[in-house]
Amino acid sequence: MKKEDLEYFHTLLTERLNELLKHADSTVTGMTQPKENFADPTDRASHEAERSFELRIRDREHKLIKKIKKALERIENGTFGRCETCEEEISIERLKARPVTTQCIECKTREEDMENALGL
């Protein structure tokens, strides 16, 4: 992979990581504030549903943070852009669509087909 491409992905991933970390900080700050008292049970249920939804989003973001950190490590150790299954280069188009990917489209498709066949 060209040096310019690696720099592009390093910048892209670093910016996304910083953005996600800011969201995580604001969620933690929001969760540590005193609980509100709701006179109406419907208001309380609505508040709890919103909070649960936000926690699910933050959990997904936490998983993405881990993937981004691993992708940045791969850039540093020279393995970024190589399929972990077949060791061929992953296309730039695929990396632009999903920069944290570890598999080329062919290997990922084959893996998903196997999972579907097994009912996973």
Image: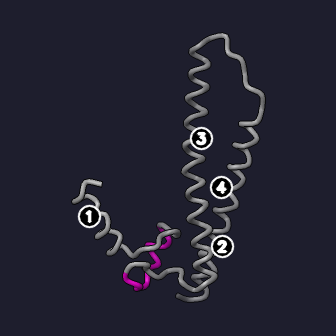
Q: Which residue is mark 2?
A: 11
Q: List the single residue furthest toward the top.
A: 39
Look at 49% across and 80% down and name the residue there. Answer: 81
Magenta residues (range): 86-97
In the displayed structure, 44 sits above or below 9; it is above
Amino acid residing under circle 3:
Leu
From mark 3 to mark 2, how far is it between C-alphas? Answer: 27 Å
The quarter holding residue 41 reads: top right
Report the Cα–Cα distance between label 2 and label 1.
33 Å
How far is the residue under mark 4 from the one under mark 3?
Answer: 14 Å
Going from N to C along the chain, the mark reached first, 4 or 2, is 2
Residue at which label 1 appears:
113
Mark identifier at residue 55: 3
Judge whether residue 95 is colored magenta: yes
- The mark lying in front, picked from 3 and 2, is 3
Q: Identity of the amino acid at label 1?
A: Asp
Name which of mark 1 and mark 3 comes first in the sequence.
3
| Mark 4 to mark 2 CA distance (whole Å) | 14 Å
Labels 3 and 2: the sequence-earlier one: 2
